[in-house]
Image (cartoon, helix red, strand yellow):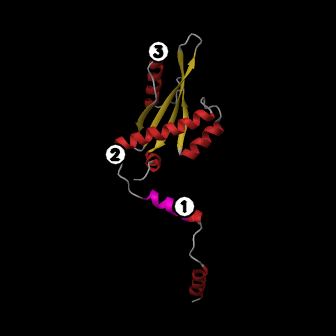
Amino acid sequence: MRRLLILAIIACSCTGKLSDEQRQKLHEGMATQDIKRVSEADLMEAAWTYARAVIADVEKADLYLRSKSKIDSIAAARHVRIYSLIPADSALREIERQLVDAYITGADVGSVGDNIQKVGEDSLLFTKPVFSNHPDGSQQFSHAIGIKMARKTIVLSMPTP
């Protein structure tokens, strides 16, 4: 009986109003629960858009990924993993090694660009090559910036119809 009385007092004292911030968080949480049907083409297009926005932030902060705190801050804000793919790194996964090899070969030929690959079932890897320019006008592959993105992050970044 006593517990029932305390529960009734608590229920009556609650005004049932949410602050604007609480209401916004509630709506955002509800939006993440919506079921979206996304085609593979739409997902890839959204991934390109999202990755290019992240790359723009990275290029403003530190193209060579030397400032770990700035890069980690961008990664946390964008819900991605940002890292450098260096040719001599023995910890590269097979897909990463293939991309680095393609960038090295492409630098010699003169035709390389951004790339996006599926990694596992729930992630995508966007890579952008970074080159060192030589005085004679030639370029040498330095490293690639890798951005690993979860499909969920990409889907949530897509505008709602």
- From this view, report whether residue 18 is shown above or below residue 42: below
- Residue 3, image quadrant: bottom right
- From this view, report whether residue 154 is shown above or below residue 105: below
Distance in Å between CA atoms under marks 1 and 3: 51 Å
Which amino acid lies under the numbered mark 1 shown in the image of this protein? Lys
Residue located beneath label 1 in the image: 25
Identify the secondary structure beneath mark 1.
helix
Viewer-nearest residue: 43 or 142: 43
Distance in Å between CA atoms under marks 2 and 1: 28 Å
Q: Residues within 10 Å of mark 2 (few under 14, many from 20)?
A: few
**Magenta stretch prevailing secondary structure:** helix
- CB under 8 Å between discs 2 and 1: no
Asked if residue 68 lies left or right of residue 106, the reply is right
Q: Residue 38: horizontal and vertical position, in percent?
A: 36, 48
Nearest-to-viewer mark from 1 and 3: 1
Residue located beneath label 2 in the image: 39
Q: Residue 73: horizontal and vertical position, in percent?
A: 62, 43
